[in-house]
Image (tube, rainbow, N blue to C red):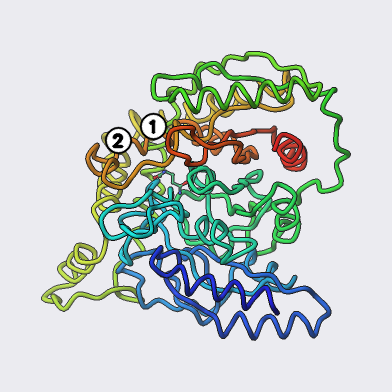
Amino acid sequence: MERIESAITSAIRHRPLNALITETFDLARHQAKEAIKRGQKPFPLVVKDCYALKGVRATCASKMLKDYVPPYTATSVQRLIDSGGCVIGKGNMDEYSMGTSSALGHFGPVKNGLSNLEKLDDDWVVAGGSSGGPAVSVQMGIADCSIGSDTGGSVRNPAAFTGVFGFKPTYGTISRYGLIPLVNSLDAPSIFAQSAEECWRFFEIAAGRDANDSTSIDPKTSLLSKKLSDLVIGIPKEYHNESLTDEAWQLWNRAANILTRLGAKVRTVSLPLTKYSLICYHVASGGDIASNMARYDSVAYGHRSSNNQSTFELYSSSRTESLNSVVKKRIHFGNYFLMKKHRKEYFERALKVRRLIAEEMWKAFKEVDLLLTPTACGVAPLFSQLHGENFARESDDDFYTQPVNMAGVPAVSIPLGTSPSSNLPLSVQLIGDRLQDRLVLEVAEQLY
Ligand code: GLN
């Protein structure tokens, strides 16, 4: 109970960081009492606002869903609650999980706890995204575990920017039932925690087959772990690109040296298709996004415009008034790629390229046990820097995280150091083959 009260105190103290869209302190206290009655130790949990939690609004940080209250709870969230999770609040994010900054949502930007707290109104350190609120919640002790979603890096990126662990498991190991979709075949419910061990603990609770998600699978939780001296770690040379900062490059080297010292064999590998991953993602995901977003017509639920002269105007005005420019742009180009005359050239070709990228990564795991890469090109930028560059930095960062989702493999972002110039956290990423979730986290634990 004490831990729940201290988490609530921290949530109140850190309100200026805007990590939570909805606070659910009374619910957390109630859940804590129930957990204690069941003989469990309650722990504070924050849930990204794209998950359903019965009776609490799920907004996706959009005006469209600002009053939407789901009548059921997502499987992953329910499993965590059943094991002692007490929901402190719903985490702020990028609108509909599109973005890498958590800065443009309807409820205002999430601010990194490492910002200059006296000047928060003028500028701040970006929290990363799209799961920025859940990341800041673990960073500031508002949660021991938070659940985000990772479609192209949305958990690993904010984990790197805030200096916590962010674990994206093998696709399908955590059920997507109750997660509002971005790109169904890439969406991975994922975990933030303060250590790799904690990530494993919460992963084991949340994971496993679910009758409500036909793509869900059981993780192999009983795999015997290997010794580091038996492992081969691959360094994919294409990840050393022109966006990578010196600091991030040095930390990556340091991680490789630590693993060598611990007995692992480290060697360079080549993944030449990596450079096509992001562009391929934007074409292939556009199709899913345009289709998924079509349900928001304001008729059954969602923001409804007063402009209702005709059905068409009602649809159009409701969407125009309530979706931000990032979301609108993606719907537009998604529909463009899906049009009859473009579909073959763009959408279908992107799906083929996606398969090749995935196969290239799976093949690498025939030669190495794990891949070691940076998580982002450098430390978190200030919001003023991001804005000035028209958010171009965001795709620079997605470069390192996105191919993992194409291949459906597990990966963890490990906060391994801080920048000597800014003192902000820097991270590396460990990637494993499908269902090697435990190996990824065990090596992460030893590396840290
Ligand atoms: N940054 C990527 C995007 O904007 C990935 C987002 C995600 O993983 N949800 O689409």
92 or 55: which is nearer to us?
92
- Secondary structure under badge 2? helix
Question: Is residue 185 visible from the viewing direction of this image?
Answer: no
- Residue 425 visible, this orientation: yes
Residue 321's x, y, as percent? 20, 66
What is the count of numbered marks?
2
**Compared with residue 234, is residue 135 higher up or lower down, i.e. above or below?**
below
Give the SS element for disc 1. helix
Q: CA distance from mark 1 to mark 2?
A: 7 Å
Is 282 rendered above or below residue 162? Answer: above
Residue 237 at what x, y percent from top left? 54, 16
| Most foreground residue, 121 or 133 | 121
Q: Quadrant of the C terminus?
A: top right
Quadrant into which the N terminus falls:
bottom right
Give the residue type that dot 1 points to.
Asp
Please give the residue where the numbered disc 2 appears in the rendered image. 392
Q: At x 69% / y 52%, what residue is drawn?
A: 199
Residue at left offset 70%, top offset 28%: 370
Where residue 153 sits in the image (x, y, percent)? Answer: 50, 42
Which amino acid lies under the numbered mark 2 shown in the image of this protein? Ala
Image position of 325 (left or right of 157):
left
Residue 381 placed where, x, y %?
Answer: 36, 41
Q: Residue 396 bears which disc, if any?
A: 1
Q: Which quarter of the frame holds ligand 1?
A: top left
Residues at marks 1 and 2 touching, judged by CB atoms closer than 8 Å: yes
Q: Which of the labelled discs sits on residue 415, or is there none?
A: none
Q: Residue at x 75, y 80 (%)?
A: 35
Asked where in the image residue 336 lies, by quadrant, the reply is top left
Q: Residues within 10 Å of mark 1 (few under 14, many from 20)?
A: some
Reply above or below: 28 against 430.
Answer: below
- Check mark 1 vs ligand 1: CB closer than 8 Å? yes or no: no
